Image (cartoon, grey):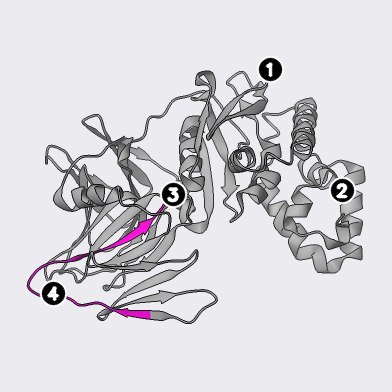
Amino acid sequence: MKTRAEYNILDFLKDDSFLRSVLLLTDDDVEFWDNYVLENPEKKQEIEAAKQLLSSMTFDDETYSEQEKLELLEHVNDQVKSIRRHRLYVGFYKIFTAACVVALLSVGVYSFFAPFTSDNQVATIEKNRSNFEKDTRLVIAGERTIPLEEGDDVLYGGGEATISSINQQDERYAVDVNDSKVEYNELIVTKGRRASHLVLEDGSKVWVNSGSTFRFPTTFEKNKREVYVDGEIYIEIAKDAERPFFVKTSEMSVRALGTRFNVMAYHDELAQSVVLVEGLVEVQSNDESKKKILQPDHMLTLASNSMDITAANTYDFISWKDGLLQFRSQPLSMILAKISRHYDLYIDCEKDIKDLKCSGKLVLFDDPKDVLETISRTISLEKADSKTVPMSYEMNGNTILLKKRS
C-alpha cells in the first residue's frame, strides 16, 4: 500500500482525513496536514493543487449548517467505501460519478439545444457523419486523412498543415490548393476525445470540442472568411477589416470582424447558441427572419423559432477548452449531457431531479477513473428548501442512471 509520503494529487483527494481538513476544517486533521507539509516540503505544491481543486467545490456556509456538512461527509465516506468494495465496477460506474461535481443545486428549468437541418456545407458534415471513426483526425480537401493524437495542435497555412505534438517532432503535410474551386478541410473530434486546437491561415485560433466537426476552406476567399460547424467551437478571430468572418451552422450565421466567441450547434440538441467573450457579432437565422447584435458577456440562444439574448458568465461556456467544465445554476440534465459527450457514454437521471440546478467545477482528467475517485465524493443536490439530496447510481448495460438515494 502506498504511504502518505508517496502521495500524488489524486491520492490526497482520496484521503478522508485530507478531505475533512479542507472541507470541514477539523482541528486534528488540519494540524496533521500542516505537520505533514513541514515534514514533506517536496509535497507542498501537490498539496496546494489538491486544496485548490477542493476549494472550487467547497460548501457555502450560508447554505449548509455544520450538521449538514457532517452528514454530507458521512455520505461521501459511504460512497468511497462502496467504491472500494466494488473495484470490479471500474467502467461506466466510475466514469459517471467521476464526471459529476455538484456543490450547490436549486430548482429550475433551462432548455438549451435544437435540431439539425441543411445549408450545403453543414449538410456535407451530416452526410459524412455516418463515416465517423473513433479517432480524432484532420481530413485535407476531402481526400487525405491525418490521425491526431491527444494534445496535438494543428497549424494550417502556407500551403501545408503542420501537426505539433508534445513528445514528437512536428510533421508537415503539403496541401494542394485549387484556385478554380473552393475545397474544404475538416477537423473531426469524436466523442470521448479531448478538444483539439487549430490555427487557421489568417491566424484565427479555434478550439473544437468533443463530438464536433469543424469545416474550413483550403484557402479563404478574397472578400470573406467562412467556416462551418456541427458541434461546439471556441474561436478567436484575427482582425481583417476587408474580410468579415462567418461561422455557419445548420440554423444560423455568425458574422464578425475581430472577436472571441463560442458557438454550440450540435445536430442532436434542441437549440443553438453563441456566447460572446469580446468584440461584437451579428447573428442571423438561416431563413433570414431573425437577426440580432450580440454584446460581450451575453449569450444568444436560437430555438423553437425564437432568438433570445441573456447575460452570461462567459467562462462557464468556454471552460471546456481548458479541460474543465464550470457551471453555475445549470440544470442537472444539461450537465449530464455535456459529461455524456465528453466520455462517450449515455448518462441519465430520474425525472424529478432533471431540473435541479447545479453549480460547481469539474476537472476533466485524462483517466475518468481518476476523475471519479477525486470528485464523486462531493456529489450532492440541493432543493429550494435547502435540503440536500443524497445520490446513488444504477448501471443497466451501457446506460448509467443517477437517482435519489433511498
Disc 4 on helix, strand or loop? loop
Q: Which residue is mark 1?
A: 406
Q: Nearer the viewer, mark 4 or mark 1?
A: 4
Question: Where, quadrant-wise, is the N terminus in this rendering?
Answer: bottom right
* Residue 184 on the magenta segment: yes
Q: Nearer the viewer, mark 4 or mark 2?
A: 4
Would residue 22 be found to the left or right of residue 257 on screen? right
Mark 1 or mark 3, earlier in chain: 3
Disc 3 on helix, strand or loop? loop
Q: Residue at x 51, y 58 (%)?
A: 322
Q: Which residue is mark 4?
A: 178
Q: Residue at x 67, y 22 (%)?
A: 405
Which numbered circle lies on residue 191? 3
Q: Which residues are magenta?
A: 172-190
Q: Which residue is mark 2?
A: 30
Q: CA distance from mark 3 to mark 4?
A: 32 Å
Q: CA distance from mark 2 to mark 3?
A: 41 Å
Would residue 57 be found to the left or right of residue 43 on screen? left
Mark 2 or mark 3, earlier in chain: 2
- Badge 3: few (under 14), some or many (20 or more) residues near its Cα, within 10 Å? many
Placement of 299 over or under 399, stated as above or below: below
Mark 2 or mark 1, earlier in chain: 2
Which quarter of the figure has residue 63? top right
